[in-house]
Image (tube, rainbow, N blue to C red):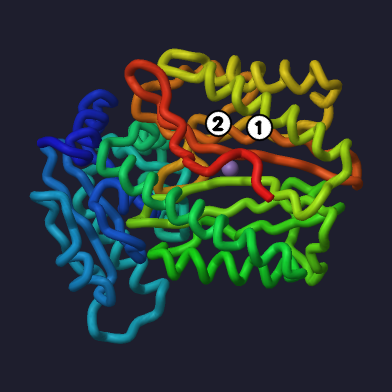
């Protein structure tokens, strides 16, 4: 068995499991290629036989789009209208009937919904949590995934370029969000990766600023943080855009943040510890006395989900590996006054790294 299901089968053998039962939309997408599956469960038996259980409403679409050869697709609801609870009970009875007493079942506790919770309750102590194994598998991207992420990034960058002329026209932050998301769709995005952030002036002081009805005026800087989804894969980019002449202090802070980003981009590569990447960024910022104002982690993996492992932060000893796609996103937030952030996406390669962004760090 090859491909992604082959990786799951290897995990099953490595952990000595009799079955793996996986829920969670990102997991189902990863292992079967189906975009936005609803309510599916993937059940793999010890010999590799795999069933994908899907609600009837999605049965035809799932059957048509399932990429993995050898997966048996079965509907678990019927035409009869029943309560949600009855449907779940039937599903659990079915899955349970596949699992003889005493078998060891691997489940991903990162994705526990009502169905999975009830299943885990029924299975009791025979459950092994394989969530970190699954995250490690998903952290290494193949060529198909990298191409989708690159396209998602290209769309986000092109949308941001289109917004630049609007920002000089006195649009509000909310209007700018609306325009960006329209541009994303116009450019072929299948969705937005997360709620787009447009924050201007003092609203930039908050890393997770909520866009408001405030107009963007000349002499202000604007943090734009957006991501597109393309064929189930996300991008994540941030730029701090200067509209007209911005205050010298903000401009100097932006220079320091850019320097921290470039230092980190030059440093990352295979077998570099992620906590050391985080330290590199903090070291540059501390030379400018800004390290206390960097209040979040330095980045994260990106894939089907916009936040995946590895988290680029202190205390994480994991090493970067070829095939990982990560963000690097130093930021500085000075009290309630202002903030700046720049975020790029980087592919870790066998010999080093490839910065995936084409857009320059500084925009106006
Ligand atoms: Mn990010």
Q: Quick check: marks 1 and 2 in contact, CB under 8 Å?
A: yes
Q: At 71% from the left edge and 31% from the top edge, which residue is drawn?
A: 257
The residue nearer to you, when weighing 16 against 320, is: 320
Position of 33 relative to 179 (above/below): above
Q: At 63% from the left edge and 22% from the top edge, which residue is drawn?
A: 278
Q: Quadrant of the N terminus?
A: top left
Residue 119 in view here: no
Q: Which mark is residue 240?
A: none
Label 2 CB-ligand 1 distance < 8 A: no
The location of residue 192, given as percent across then percent down, is 50, 61
Is 220 left, or right, of 337 in this rendering? left
The residue nearer to you, when weighing 259 against 27, is: 259
The location of residue 280, given as percent across then percent down, is 65, 17
Position of 232 relative to 99 (above/below): below
Residue under numbered circle 1: 297
The location of residue 147, given as percent across then percent down, is 31, 44
Is 34 left, or right, of 166 in this rendering? left
Is 194 left, or right, of 249 in this rendering? left
Looking at the rendered structure, the number of numbered marks drawn on it comes to 2
Crowding near the residue tagged with mark 1, few <14, some 14–19, many ≥20 C-alpha atoms within 10 Å: some
The location of residue 72, given as percent across then percent down, is 12, 57
Crowding near the residue tagged with mark 2, few <14, some 14–19, many ≥20 C-alpha atoms within 10 Å: many
Position of 273 relative to 43 (above/below): above
Q: At 54% from the left edge and 24% from the top edge, which residue is drawn?
A: 265
**Mark 2: secondary structure:** strand
**Mark 1: secondary structure:** loop
Q: At 75% from the left edge and 27% from the top edge, which residue is drawn?
A: 256
Distance (Cα) linking label 1 and label 2: 7 Å
Residue under numbered circle 2: 311
Residue 351 in view here: yes
Where on the image, by quarter, is ligand 1?
A: top right
Position of 170 relative to 294 (above/below): below
């Amino acid at each position: 068995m090859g491909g992604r299901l082959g990786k799951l089968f290897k995990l099953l053998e490595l952990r000595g499991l009799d079955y793996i039962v996986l829920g969670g939309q990102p997991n189902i997408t990863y292992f079967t290629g189906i975009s936005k599956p609803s309510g599916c469960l993937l059940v793999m038996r010890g010999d590799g036989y795999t069933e994908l259980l899907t609600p009837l409403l999605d049965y035809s679409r799932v059957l048509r789009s399932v990429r993995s050869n050898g997966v048996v697709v079965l509907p678990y609801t019927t035409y009869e209208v029943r309560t949600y609870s009855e449907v779940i009970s039937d599903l659990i009875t079915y899955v349970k009937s596949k699992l003889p007493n005493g078998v060891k079942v691997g489940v991903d506790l990162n994705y526990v919904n009502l169905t999975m919770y009830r299943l885990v309750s029924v299975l009791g102590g025979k459950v092994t949590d394989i969530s970190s194994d699954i995250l490690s598998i998903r952290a290494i991207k193949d060529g198909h995934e990298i191409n989708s992420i690159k396209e998602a990034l290209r769309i986000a960058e092109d949308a941001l370029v289109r917004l630049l002329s609007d920002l000089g026209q006195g649009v509000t932050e909310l209007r700018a969000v609306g325009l960006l998301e329209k541009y994303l769709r116009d450019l072929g995005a299948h969705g937005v990766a997360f709620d787009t952030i447009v924050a201007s002036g003092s609203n930039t002081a908050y890393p997770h600023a909520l866009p408001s009805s405030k107009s963007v005026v000349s002499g202000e800087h604007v943090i734009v943080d957006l991501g597109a989804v393309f064929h189930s894969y996300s991008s994540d980019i941030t730029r701090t855009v200067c509209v007209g002449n911005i205050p010298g202090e903000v401009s100097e802070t932006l220079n320091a943040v850019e320097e921290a980003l470039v230092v980190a981009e030059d440093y990352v590569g295979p077998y570099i510890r992620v906590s050391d990447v985080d330290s590199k960024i903090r070291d540059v910022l501390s030379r400018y006395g800004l390290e206390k104002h960097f209040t979040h982690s330095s980045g994260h993996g990106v894939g089907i989900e916009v936040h995946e492992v590895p988290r680029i932060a202190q205390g994480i000893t994991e090493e970067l590996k070829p095939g990982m796609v990560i963000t690097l996103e130093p930021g500085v937030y000075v009290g309630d006054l202002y903030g700046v952030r720049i975020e790029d996406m980087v592919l870790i390669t066998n010999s080093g790294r490839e910065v995936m962004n084409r857009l320059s760090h500084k925009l106006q």
